[in-house]
Amino acid sequence: MTVSLERPLPKPALTKKGMAVLPDSATMPRKLWTWDECRQLMDLGLLEESSRYELLEGEIVDKMWFNEPHVYVTSRIHRALLAIFGFDHVRVAAPVALAPRNAPEPDVAVMTRAAEEYLYIGTPPPSDVRLAVEVADATLSSDRAIKGFRYSEAGIPEYWIVNIPQRQLELFRQPAPDGYAEWQTVAEDGLVSPLAAPEAQIAVADLLPLASAKGAS
């Protein structure tokens, strides 16, 4: 027997790449990956190590392409922290193995060890991170809710979000299992000093793009 539908089946929401958006993992369970499994995929050539992926909550996330304001701000942060901590202790967009199912890539991070050591010991643990920095535009909500929580849970002593839309720096300290106990907003005309170098001062305005910049992707 043929049954006529009053209206056709709804068209699924599509990503920019034309893929259907799946239901969330509560209604359609997914395979959750560990960082060790991701490394095995890279070793087998099944996941390109140079690609823009990071492991968040057990899912391999395809990071969006950075627009020009994001690239500019990242370079400004990198330069400012290099002047304080030196080349060997500042990393850009490199993974940190927070937990088996979380290996995010801070836009910039200040490390306790020199860069050469990671050639031998592999992906750094969170105990090696003195400061993690994320540049936020379209990613602001996840930088606060997901990465902020996981950085705190892992014990990273200081976390900055350089908030491009609101032209401010959000500073988080005193990590705890349920989130950072101390947080504050530093305005564009303010100064910030890293916990690991309290004598140094960085002008927030020096990290931000010009207010008149359009920032086309």
Image: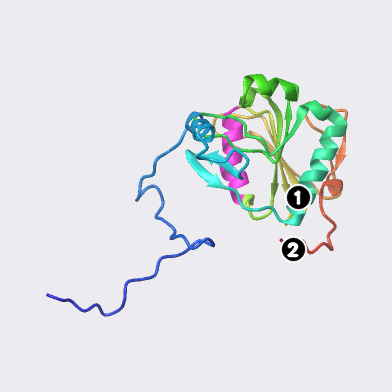
Image quarter of the C terminus: bottom right
Residue 151 picture quarter: top right
Q: Is residue 51 above or below residue 5?
A: above
User: Is the magenta region chiefly helix, strand or loop?
Assistant: helix
Residue at 39% x, 70% y is 11
Secondary-structure class at tag 1: helix
Residue at position x 63%, y 30% from top? 175
Q: Quadrant of residue 108?
A: top right
Q: Indicate left or right for 35 with 109 as reference.
A: left
Where is residue 104? Give x, y as percent.
60, 37
Above or below 83: residue 169: below
Tell whether position 112 is magenta.
no
Q: Residue shown at 69%/52% (left/top)?
A: 66
Q: Which region is colored magenta?
A: 141-154
CA–CA distance in space, label 1 to label 2? 11 Å
In the picture provided, is 122 more to the left or to the right than 100?
Answer: right
Q: Do the residues labelled 1 and 2 touch (CB within 8 Å)?
A: no
Judge left or right: residue 128 versus residue 101: right
User: What quarter of the picture does the N terminus occupy?
Assistant: bottom left
Amino acid at pointer 2: Ala
Q: Which mark is residue 216?
A: 2
Q: Nearer the viewer, residue 130 or 121?
A: 121
Q: Of label 1 and label 2, which has the lower sequence position? A: 1
| Picture residue at 78% right of the left edge, 48% below the top | 73
Front residue of 69 and 179: 69
Residue nearer the viewer, 13 or 17: 17
For disc 1, the marked residue is 71
Q: Is mark 2 on a helix, strand or loop?
A: loop
Could you tell me the amino acid type at mark 1?
Answer: Val
Furthest residue in direction front, as rendered: 45
Q: Does residue 55 show up?
A: yes
Binning the other alpha carbons within 10 Å of mark 1 as few (below 14), some (14 to 19) or many (20 upward) gives some
